[in-house]
Amino acid sequence: MEDMCPADLAQLSAAIAAGEDLGPFVRRAFACGRPEPLLASLSAAVRDREAEIEELCRAHFHYFIRAVDDLRSLLADADALKRSLSASHSALLSSAAPLLASLESFLAKRSLAGNLSSALASSRRCVRLPL
């Protein structure tokens, strides 16, 4: 790094940050026969980026862990809701079955009563008819 002037270092840093081609820097360093300063600068840039990546991964890992905890809590709530709905469904079925049986019996008796009324009305007409 001692052979690279501050302007070269600034240009190198800007090129790395912009994702530009570093080929001209590499060619110049090897043409001068002194690639060590360039390699040291690139190694420092790599260390900086590694630290950024580690910090970003750590933050995302914490978000991921929180999301997993939230999902586990949501799953537990969903299971409780499922059990509650199942219990309500069973209670509804047990109370609705006798009501349905009573309704079916009522409808059958109502139909029978209608048929009997029709039969009685018809028989009254038959009795009133002169022969």
Image (tube, rainbow, N blue to C red):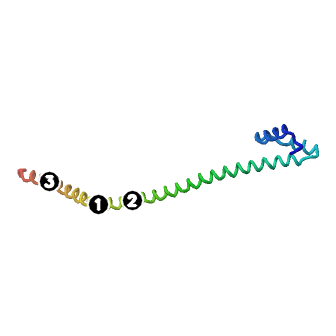
Residue of label 3:
117
Locate the N terminus and report the quarter of the image it occupies.
top right
Q: Amino acid at mark 3?
A: Ser
Circle nearer the N terminus (1, 3)? 1
Q: Quadrant of residue 82?
A: bottom left
Between 117 and 125, the one nearer to me in the picture:
117
Residue carrying label 2: 84
Of the pair 88 and 80, the residue shown nearer to us: 80
Residue corresponding to mark 1: 95
**Left or right position of 25 against 120:** right
Of marks 1 and 2, the one in the foreground = 2
Residue 101 versus residue 45: which sits nearer the camera? 45
| Structural crowding at the residue carrying mark 1, measured as other residues with C-alpha within 10 Å and reported as few (<14), some (14–19) or many (≥20) | few
| Cα distance between the residues tagged 2 and 3 | 48 Å
CA gap, disc 1 and disc 3: 33 Å
Residue 8 screen position, x and y as percent: 85, 39
Q: Residue at x 56, y 54 (%)?
A: 66
Q: Earlier in the sequence, mark 1 or mark 2?
A: 2
Looking at the rendered structure, the secondary structure element under dot 1 is helix
Instruction: Name the kind of residue labelled 1 in the image.
Output: Ser
